[in-house]
C-alpha cells in the first residue's frame, strides 16, 4: 500500500481531493450563515430561535455569531462605533432575504460600523402570519439584552441604529420604547400593516421610539402600513404601485412581494450615490403631483429631505414648520437605482375660453439624446393669463437641453380639435435647481400634434 500510494498519481489525487474537501468544509462551518429554510418548514411551522450575526470591515465575508448575554468574547465588536441592527420580517417561504448580503456589504462600504443581522428566520417562517407576529414580540427581549450588554461595555444609545423591514420595523419600535426613545435612529422599511393597522402607538412603530425615525412606504394598499409612523415618512410613487412591479397574477410571486420589497431596494440605492433621491414635503400625493409642493426653495433655509441612509440630516430641521411628523412624496423610475429627474413646467395661456387637458413633454440635449416624461400628468386647467403647473419626470438626466417637444390633448376621441395659445412656457429642473430655466414665448399647440421648438434661457428675455 505504501509503495502504491507513492507511485500512483490517481491515488494521490484522490487523497488530496478528499483532504481539501474536508478542510474546505471545516472552513465553511466556521462562518455562521443566515438560516435557510423551505416552504415545508413554513407549512409545519417553526419555533423561535434567534441568531445574531456580526459583521465589520474586519470580518465582512465571514460572520461572527455573538451572544446577547456575553459580548466580551467577541473578536470584532467595537462598541465605540455605530452599531446598525438589521431586522427582517415575515418569511412565508423560509428562504433568506435576497437583499441581506447587499445591505450588509453596502453599509460597510459606506461606513466603518458594526452590522448585526438579527436572524429570526426560525420563528418568522410559518404559514400562520399571526404566529410570526407573536414570535416577533419575543425577539424584542433578546435585542434588549443585546443592547444592555453593549451599553454595559461602553456603547452609547446614540450610536444604535435599527433598520427594520416589515414586521422588523415594529420590532425596532418595541425595542425603542423600552429605552424611552433614546436610541439614535430607527428606519422602517414598509412597516407591516396587517395586525398593526389601527393599533395605538404603544402597539406599533411610532416617531417617539428613537431620536429620529424615518419610514419608507411602498405597499400601503396591501402589506404595508398606510399612515405616517416616523418623523419623516417617504411615499415613493404615492406609496402604492411601484414602477416595474407586476400588475397582474401573471407576475407570479413577484406580484405579491415586489411593491413591499421595493422599500429595501430604494434604501440600498441611496448607498450607491448614482443619484440622491429628493423628496418633497407635502400633505398628499395629489398635491405633490399638482405641483403644489415641488419647489425646495420654498422651504428655505430648510433643504428638501433625501431618501435613505442620509435621511437623518432632516433631523436638524424638525421645527415648528415641520412638527414632528412630515410626509414627503416623489416619483421613481422602474429599475435600480430608481432615479427620476424631476422638472416643473409652467404654462400661461391666453385662450379666452378655458381648456382642460394633458401635456406630454419630451426633451432633447445637444448630443441628440431624447427622453420623454414618465409621469402621466393629471388633467390641467388652462385659463387666460393663469399659470398651469405640470410636474414631469425623466429617467435620463439631460443637461444642455436643445429642444423641447410638447403635445396637448383633451383626452377626447370625438368632437373638435382645440388649439392652446401659449403666452409663456417655463421649464425648471427640480433635481438641479441651479440650472438655467428655459422658456419659450408666443406659440400655438394643436391638439394631438407634437410641437418641437428650441428653448431660450428665461433670463435672456424681459417679459
Image (cartoon, grey):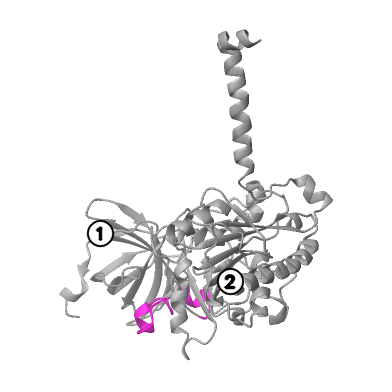
> In the image, residue 341 lies at what x, y percent?
38, 63
Residue sitting nearer the eye, 2 or 287: 2
Residue sitting nearer the eye, 31 or 269: 31
> In the image, residue 20 lies at what x, y percent?
58, 28
Residue visible at 59% across and 61% down?
116
Question: What whole-number distance in Å separates the C-alpha atoms at marks 1 and 2?
Answer: 62 Å
Residue sitting nearer the eye, 240 or 278: 278
Magenta stretch: includes residue 119:
no
| Relative horizontal placement of residue 168, taking residue 278 as reference (left or right) | right
Residue visible at 46% across and 89% down?
321
Q: Which residues are magenta?
A: 283-304
Q: Residue farthest to the right?
A: 44
Q: Residues within 10 Å of mark 2 (few under 14, many from 20)?
A: some
Q: Residues within 10 Å of mark 1 (few under 14, many from 20)?
A: some
Residue sitting nearer the eye, 419 or 322: 322
> In the image, residue 206 lies at what x, y percent?
63, 79
Q: Residue farthest to the front?
A: 2
Which label belongs to residue 403? 1
Query: Element under label 2?
Result: loop
| Relative horizontal placement of residue 183, taking residue 450 as reference (left or right) | right
Question: What residue does disc 2 label?
Answer: 153
Q: Judge whether residue 28 can be spotted in this image.
A: yes
Q: Nearer the viewer, mark 1 or mark 2?
A: 2
Q: Residue farthest to the bottom?
A: 320
Query: Element under label 1?
Result: strand
Determine the image quadrant of residue 207. bottom right
Compared to residue 334, the image places residue 283 above or below, namely below
| Relative horizontal placement of residue 458, taking residue 213 as reference (left or right) | left
Amino acid at each position: 500500500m505504501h509503495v502504491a500510494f507513492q507511485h500512483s498519481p490517481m491515488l494521490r489525487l484522490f487523497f488530496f481531493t478528499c483532504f481539501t474537501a474536508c478542510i474546505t468544509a471545516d472552513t465553511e462551518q466556521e462562518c455562521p450563515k443566515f438560516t435557510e429554510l423551505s416552504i415545508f418548514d413554513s407549512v409545519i411551522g417553526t419555533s423561535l430561535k434567534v441568531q445574531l450575526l456580526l459583521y465589520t470591515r474586519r470580518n465582512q465575508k465571514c460572520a461572527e455569531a455573538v451572544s446577547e448575554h456575553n459580548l466580551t468574547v467577541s473578536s470584532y465588536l467595537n462598541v465605540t462605533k455605530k452599531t446598525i441592527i438589521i431586522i427582517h420580517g415575515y418569511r412565508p417561504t423560509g428562504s433568506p432575504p435576497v437583499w441581506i448580503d447587499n445591505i450588509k456589504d453596502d453599509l460597510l462600504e459606506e461606513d466603518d460600523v458594526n452590522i448585526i443581522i438579527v436572524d429570526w428566520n426560525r420563528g418568522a417562517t410559518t404559514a400562520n402570519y399571526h404566529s410570526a407576529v407573536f414570535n416577533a414580540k419575543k425577539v424584542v427581549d433578546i435585542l434588549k439584552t443585546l443592547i444592555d450588554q453593549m451599553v454595559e461595555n461602553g456603547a452609547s444609545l446614540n450610536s444604535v441604529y435599527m433598520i427594520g423591514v416589515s414586521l422588523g420595523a415594529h420590532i425596532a419600535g418595541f425595542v425603542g420604547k423600552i429605552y424611552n426613545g433614546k436610541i439614535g435612529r430607527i428606519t422602517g422599511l414598509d412597516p407591516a400593516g396587517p395586525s398593526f393597522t389601527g393599533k395605538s402607538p404603544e402597539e406599533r412603530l411610532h416617531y417617539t421610539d428613537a431620536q429620529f425615525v424615518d419610514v419608507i412606504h411602498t405597499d400601503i394598499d396591501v402589506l404595508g402600513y398606510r399612515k405616517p409612523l416616523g418623523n419623516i415618512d417617504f411615499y415613493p410613487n404615492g406609496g402604492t404601485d411601484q414602477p416595474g412591479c407586476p400588475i397582474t397574477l401573471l407576475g407570479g410571486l413577484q406580484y405579491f412581494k415586489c411593491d413591499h420589497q421595493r422599500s429595501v431596494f430604494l434604501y440600498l440605492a441611496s448607498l450607491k450615490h448614482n443619484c440622491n433621491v429628493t423628496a418633497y414635503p407635502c400633505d398628499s400625493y395629489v398635491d405633490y403631483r399638482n405641483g403644489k409642493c415641488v419647489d425646495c426653495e420654498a422651504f428655505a433655509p430648510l433643504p428638501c429631505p433625501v431618501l435613505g441612509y442620509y435621511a437623518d440630516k432632516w433631523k436638524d430641521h424638525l421645527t415648528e414648520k415641520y412638527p414632528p411628523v412630515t410626509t414627503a412624496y416623489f416619483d421613481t423610475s422602474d429599475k435600480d437605482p430608481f432615479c427620476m429627474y424631476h422638472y416643473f413646467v409652467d404654462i400661461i395661456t391666453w385662450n379666452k375660453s378655458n381648456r382642460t387637458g394633458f401635456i406630454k413633454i419630451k426633451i432633447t440635449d445637444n448630443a441628440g439624446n431624447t427622453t420623454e416624461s414618465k409621469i402621466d400628468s393629471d388633467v390641467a386647467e388652462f385659463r387666460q393669463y393663469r399659470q398651469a403647473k405640470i410636474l414631469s419626470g425623466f429617467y435620463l438626466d439631460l443637461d444642455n437641453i436643445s429642444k423641447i417637444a410638447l403635445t396637448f390633448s383633451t383626452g377626447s376621441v370625438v368632437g373638435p380639435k382645440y388649439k392652446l395659445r401659449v403666452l409663456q412656457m417655463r421649464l425648471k429642473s427640480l433635481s438641479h435647481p441651479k440650472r438655467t430655466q428655459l422658456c419659450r414665448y408666443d406659440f400655438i399647440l394643436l391638439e394631438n400634434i407634437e410641437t418641437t421648438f428650441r428653448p431660450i434661457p428665461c433670463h435672456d428675455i424681459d417679459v
